[in-house]
Image: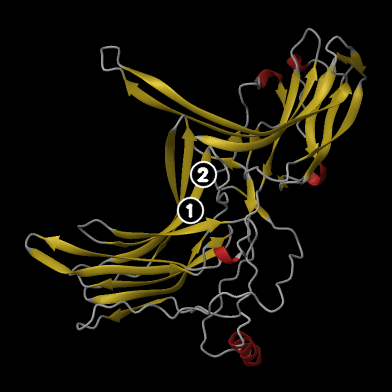
Amino acid sequence: MVAWDVDIMGKLKCFEIYLDSNKSVYHPGERVTGQVIVELKGDMKMRSLRVFMRGVAKVHWTESRSTGSRLGSYTEHYNAEVEYFFKRQVLFGGEVSEGRETLTEGRHEFNFAFDLPMGGIATSFEGKHGSIRYWLKAEMDKPWAFNHKTKKAFTVISPIDINKPEYQIQVENNIEKTLCCWLCTSGPISITARTDRKGYCPGESIAISAEFDNWSSRTVTPYASLHQTQAFFANGKSRVRRTKFTVLTGLPVSPGSGGMWESQLLKIPAVSPSIMNCCVMKVDYFVKVALHIPGSYNLTLQLPVVIGTVPYRRARPYHYSSEPRYCRPLQPQTCSLNLLPLPPPYRETVTPPPPFEEPPTYAESVGGAVDIRDEDDDLTCNMGDLTYTPMYTYVYDYRPPPAYSEIDPNPSTQSTTVRFLEDGHS
């Protein structure tokens, strides 16, 4: 609790919003409950004490434009806003502006309860040119004086269950280039890479398998990185910002040789989930796998991934190798790419995975805290904490996929499954 005792607040000693159980993360359809705490050093007259809950997606950026004359340039503003909801409750007093009520000296607790919409709201997000933000604001409507306000933001997470089949498929891509120097042309340099699945949660690791073939005369170095793309839309235009997170670097690949990654793990920090259901902004992710080539442009490919909110329930008993990486000589007579052994296809187990015993854990966004003041907030008349850090689903005890094995550790289970598929009931 933050206690204020300054002249401008007069008799008001404390004005705070508390959420029940110190909860800070909610999902669509949940009830937001708590108390507005008022502590006075003397009796105070007011028209009413109200509390509001609001959710809004807002975008803003500026661009400089030349006038083509001696007047120089001007700044053009781009704005867009979507209000998801705006709800209010009167906690003390009435709606009639002429009314006068007296709140007595001491500490008072006023309960409130709001229901979030079941759908149509996006995950909380704080970006370079916009935000998706949800907050509570309490306001004392005082006669012939400035109103006192206090504010508290909270996180809403719109569910993306990465256990759905569309997020369990592998993402694969390949690319090739040839280096040229004057009249000489080198052999091709190529990458073939894939992820173990398409959907992940923060705290999990992306298992990257790749082959790097180097027929050039230069030593190349493989690396991979996780990237976020923020796209903002307003007034028929768009603004894009990209951020790079985790980076993984491999061993150099000598001329005439090849390198291989088998399930190299790229850690996902506490980033925002993918945002695909907001009309004024979008958040996407991709893994970049690349070869650094001295004296030339790097060879790169992208593998799109989805960052979700419901952690992965491990349904497959085995696949993937624990061997870190190795280099292999290339055979001069062939340039074909031999892909890594494919893991078994994803299938639902005979009995569905058990439900979560505990609710997901959360971590503070890697973006850190933001100031939640807006045009309606006056710092001199506002109390409470005006900073806020989004909280996102985070897997603290993530275990990487076990080693791939051709030997089935549960042969009886596998034979049963094979017969089941052969009968045409897959």
Q: CA distance from mark 2 to mark 1?
A: 10 Å
Q: Quadrant of residue 311?
A: bottom right
**Mark 2 in CB contact with mark 1 (< 8 angstroms):** no
* Amino acid on which the number 2 mark rests in the picture: Lys
Q: Please indicate, yes or no, whether residue 52 appears anywhere in the rendered image.
A: yes
Percent from the top left, x then y, of residue 78? 46, 27
Which residue: 53% across, 77% down?
345
Q: Residue furthest front?
A: 424
Q: Which mark is residue 378?
A: none
In this picture, residue 31 sits left or right of residue 325: right
**Residue marked by disc 1:** 285
Percent from the top left, x then y, of residue 342? 46, 78
| Secondary structure of the residue carrying numbered label 1 | strand
Q: Residues within 10 Å of mark 1 (few under 14, many from 20)?
A: many
Q: Quadrant of the N terminus?
A: top right
In this picture, residue 285 sits left or right of residue 252: right
| Secondary structure of the residue carrying numbered label 2 | strand
Depth check: give the residue in front, 63 or 329.
Answer: 63
Q: Quadrant of the C terminus?
A: bottom right
Which residue: 32% across, 68% down?
191
**Residue marked by disc 2:** 282
* Amino acid on which the number 1 mark rests in the picture: Tyr
Percent from the top left, x then y, of residue 236? 44, 32
Q: Quadrant of residue 20?
A: top right
Q: Residues within 10 Å of mark 2 (few under 14, many from 20)?
A: some
Which residue: 23% across, 83% down?
331
Q: Please indicate, yes or no, whether residue 384 appears anywhere in the rendered image.
A: no
